[in-house]
Image (cartoon, rainbow, N blue to C red):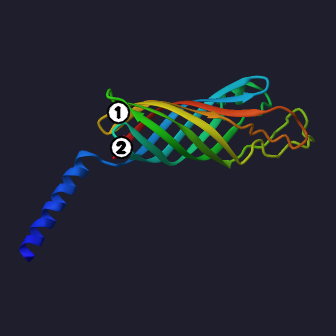
Amino acid sequence: MMKRVNIALLLLVGVLSTASAQEKKWEHSVNLSTGLFLDGTTLSYDGGLSARLGYGVAYRLAERFSVKSGVAYRVDMESPIKAFTYDGGDYDAFGFVEVPLVARYHTKDNLVLGLGPVFSFCTNNDTYYIDANPLSPLNGRTKIKDFYVGLQPSIMYQWGHFNFGVEANIGLMDVKLNHGLTTGSKYLHQVMGCVSFRF
């Protein structure tokens, strides 16, 4: 009897191991992205640089569908050239912790199409600096809110353990802090090239 139980257990372990090898449900990744930071105000879009480093975890719901989340740190800054070419210019620089929740569709051609919300928490807020008026009550006050929600579309190509592609973060909320002293709005957007190592 004991021998039969052991054989049954061995067969069960073998079947589970084979099933696990055939369809991996969980997938982890380290992600690096860099590209354009677009600071949309009511009057214009100022360009800059954006970079992000993060960890992601995806769960395969079916052959073609998965969901992915994780955590990342992102830095946005207007072009450093602006800081040196505009005397007294007040250019923006921010840091964020991001938590995305992306639904993904996997094609037969190793493309992965993603779309979902990303929650951004500002950890390094910039402050106003009005060079033309050193006594301005805006000086030293934070520029943006501590939290906003964006929409993250993406397209990635899977090659072995790597993903290569492009993703965006479209800011859906006005994040500008006017402090009752100024007007206007500010929406933060990014378009970045991405590479991920999956394991």
Q: Is residue 7 left or right of 96 when viewed as pictured?
A: left
Judge the density around disc 1: few (<14), some (14-19), many (≥20) Cα neighbours within 10 Å.
Answer: some
Q: Which residue occupies the foreground of this view, 50 or 180?
A: 180
Q: What residue type is labelled 2?
A: Arg
179 sits left or right of 86 in the view = right
Which label sits on residue 139?
Answer: none
Name the residue nearer the viewer: 11 or 153.
11
Classify 23 as above or below 174.
below
Give the vertical position of 40 relative to 101 (above or below): above
Rendered location of residue 148, percent (x, y): 68, 43
Badge 1 vs badge 2, beta-carbon distance below 8 Å: yes
Cα gap from disc 1 to disc 2, whole angstroms:
9 Å
Helix, strand or loop at mark 2: strand
Q: Mark 2 points at which residue?
A: 198
Residue placed at 37% from the left, 41% from the top? 197
Residue at 36% in and 36% down: 64
